[in-house]
Amino acid sequence: MIELLLAVWITVGAIHVAVPLAYFAAMRRIGTKRDYHLSLEPSPQPTISILIPTYNEAGVIASKLSNVVQSNYPADKLELIVIDSASTDGTAQIAREFLERNHLRGLVIEEEKRNGKSGALNLGLTRATGDLVCISDAECRWRNDALPNGVKYFSDPAIGAVSGVHDISTTGGTAALNVEGSYRSIYRMLRVAESKLHSTPVGEGEIQLFRRSQLSPFDPRVGGDDTCASLCMVEKGLRAISAEDVVFFDPAPPGWRVRFTQKIRRGQHVLQAFLKHKGLLRGGSVFCRVIFPMEFFIYVINPILFPVFLALTALVMITIPLIAILVAAGALVTALVPSLRTSASTYLSNNITMLAALVQEARGNKQLVWTKIEENRRSTETVEQPIVNR
């Protein structure tokens, strides 16, 4: 009986811990050894419609628009479309005045009530005229070369979507920020490596570009509009990549409570997108045979194994004293070594948040229209400034 319990514990542990670690190790090697395998040729600069959904963003919308226009991309090639979802703080008026004062091409669309981000983006999409469409959140900022760097990948006809990557150099301070930095470092490596192999299934709504001719309306039943749109491109036979030179800055929540709230919502939205596109598990490409099954396992299956593994570990420790001593010693070493402590905290917090996301989804609480996290906007709030010489 003890032998059977030990065998089950080792098997579940290997599946739950070793399989993801093996995938991460393989992707890290691919990310350092391969390039994107694209044929990039100089081409005329396409026009871009930039869709920015907002809700009570008065403190950040002017600096957001300024940041976009100060990209190293011709302003006359940009069309700025702000879709405001019934803000009560004057966001729409601030955006409209900014466009008029700086003689920028664009418009502000006002919704009478909040219908979720996907609904707002669909309104913007009906008015977009650019060759490319770019979606972006109001609180994030781009590196000045992010937009032109993203555009260049569309010179290869195989590309349907391009996402950016987080800048993680400023993460630090609180324990929650350190864990977030560890998570984003792994996340960034994984998305880039998957993109070099074929495509990554998880998009980044902070900056994500699409071919407008290939972009279908966003599904209002799915919160993960960026991920869902990426998977739609893969279904059409195109590649959806995260480009390591398309860099954005996004404030991280400084406290645990806010971090869990954000991560649960985002995790749930990825689940919704994955479940909608589960048919990709039956495809024949390397994305369908390797990348998407592993990501589906990490986001959907592995969190369910987490409480099972913890329960089995507790049972084995009670039954086999030697195992209890080894596990306790390992936990002590982990607690004393900062890098191991951060990795362990990342592992625990991510599994807890994804398990909570699964529970939320099972309960039918879709979180398609959510309460804003004000802490994420405070670091980006600035006094409104006019556009400087470019």
Image (cartoon, rainbow, N blue to C red):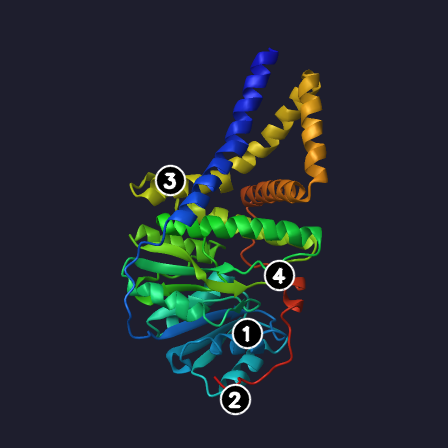
Q: What residue does disc 4 label? A: 170
Q: Nearer the viewer, mark 3 or mark 2?
A: 3
Is 200 left or right of 174, judged from the image as shown?
A: left
Residue 64 - label? 1
Work out whether residue 338 or residue 246 is closer to the camera in this orientation and state it. 338
* Any part of residue 173 in sight: yes
**Disc 1 residue type (three-letter):** Lys
* Any part of residue 123 in sight: no
Q: Residues within 10 Å of mark 4 (few under 14, many from 20)?
A: few
Mark 1 or 4, nearer chain start: 1
Q: CA distance from mark 3 to mark 2?
A: 51 Å
Q: Residues within 10 Å of mark 2 (few under 14, many from 20)?
A: few
Image position, residue 313 (x, y; %): 64, 25
Q: Is residue 150 above or below residue 259?
A: below
Q: What residue does disc 2 label? A: 101
**Disc 2 residue type (three-letter):** Arg
Q: Residue furthest top?
A: 1
Q: Are marks 1 and 3 in contact (CB under 8 Å)?
A: no
Mark 1 or 3, nearer chain start: 1
Is 367 left or right of 283, judged from the image as shown?
A: right
Q: Residue furthest front?
A: 33
Residue in the picture at 43% in, 70% down: 147
Secondary structure found at label 2 = helix
Q: CA distance from mark 4 to mark 3?
A: 33 Å
Secondary structure found at label 1 = helix
Is 334 left or right of 212, judged from the image as shown?
A: right
Work out whether residue 294 or residue 55 is closer to the camera in this orientation and state it. 294
Q: What residue does disc 3 label? A: 290
